[in-house]
Amino acid sequence: MNTNKHSKKVVHLPKFIQKNHTAILFSLLLFLMLPVTFVHAQRLYTTDGVNVRAKPNSSSKVLTSVSAGTSVTKTGRSGNWIAVRVNGIKGYIYKSYLSGSKNTSTATVSKSTSYRAVITASSVNLRAKPSFSSRVKGSLSAGQAVTVCSTNGSWKKVQTSKGKKGYVYGIYVGKSASSSKTTAKKTTTASSSSYRTKAVSYAKRRVGDKYSQSRRDQKGYADCSSLMRDAYKSASGKYIGNTTYEQLELMHSYLYSISSVRQATVGDLVFHQNGSNHVGIYLGNGKVLHASQTAGKVKISTFSSSSRYWDTGCNAAGYCVKH
């Protein structure tokens, strides 16, 4: 009879654990010591007008479009696509169209000496503060002379001849009156004429290429700005900018206002600046060669003299001659 009522039961661990308990304990300690990675929301800025898509690919549904300089919140990543949240919408933007800071910090204010300038596009908003969400105080017309009082990031504080002050987005303000249509188009040297011809020739060879923002640098693909970049790189060996925003910035003094695309010079670039930016190259007779997102390919479109879609011309050949 067992009189030890209080004897303890011995729990026998499996032989595998008994033999390897030291290694198992060491591995467990290592696991517990591993750092935990937390994903923090990050603020980014769009470098160009770009679509926000439902899925991380260029054929996915477009949820909304945002303009250059728009602040978005990064929530994740899928390959080359960044998951973002903007204006309450969650979607994806290709990484090349995002930057950790604005092209020019809006926090930096320049108090440089005032100078005379000219508005380079039609119906440009004069705002109360240097922000797209600020109140519109009025509208400025193409060719209108203004005085630039100071610079606030990408914005210019200007004063009209009637004394009205406000802010205009920098790409719409010429550095001097030479930015007007008449003067900007005077650069018609043999070199610039050759560049225009070669750029048109190159662009025509790209007709039919597929539209893609994510594969824009691959053979057989393009978006609107990469096509123009490549056309003038092929024609002149010069760099005119990687995005529509950068092209407008770099060739600032070579912009001129047009009320119809038929006012542009053959071989010049033409921009649509109302809403999301778009760029093409003018072929003459109302025809513009461009990478169309709607059509999904590079194509030639014809615009009537009454069409107001294209509002700005650009003497890219003249820019290449001088740079």
Image (cartoon, helix red, strand yellow):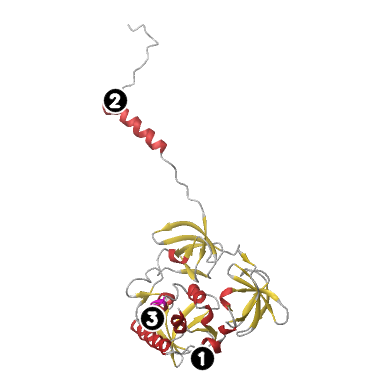
**Which residue is drawn at the image coordinates 55% and 62% (left, top)?**
88
Whether residue 194 sits left or right of residue 121 in the image: it is left
Amino acid at pointer 1? Gln
Whether residue 36 sits left or right of residue 150 in the image: it is left
Q: Which residue is mark 3?
A: 236
Whether residue 32 sits left or right of residue 119 in the image: it is left
Which of the two labelled residues, at mark 2 and mark 3, occupies the earlier sequence position? Answer: 2
Residue 244 point in image, percent of width and height: 48, 75
Most extreme residue toward the right, as rendered? 163
Q: Are marks 1 and 2 in contact (CB under 8 Å)?
A: no
User: Viewer-proximal residue, 53 or 220?
Assistant: 220
Q: Regarding mark 1 in the picture, which secondary structure is present there? A: helix
Q: What's the magenta region? A: 229-238
| Residue 21 occupies quadrant | top left
Q: Which residue is mark 2?
A: 18
Residue 176 point in image, percent of width and height: 59, 81
CA separation, marks 1 and 2?
88 Å
Q: Which residue is mark 1?
A: 263
Query: Mark 2 or mark 3: which is in front?
Result: 3
Q: Regarding mark 2 in the picture, which secondary structure is present there? A: helix
Amino acid at pointer 3? Ser
Query: Mark 1 or mark 2: which is in front?
Result: 1
Residue 151 point in image, percent of width and height: 62, 70
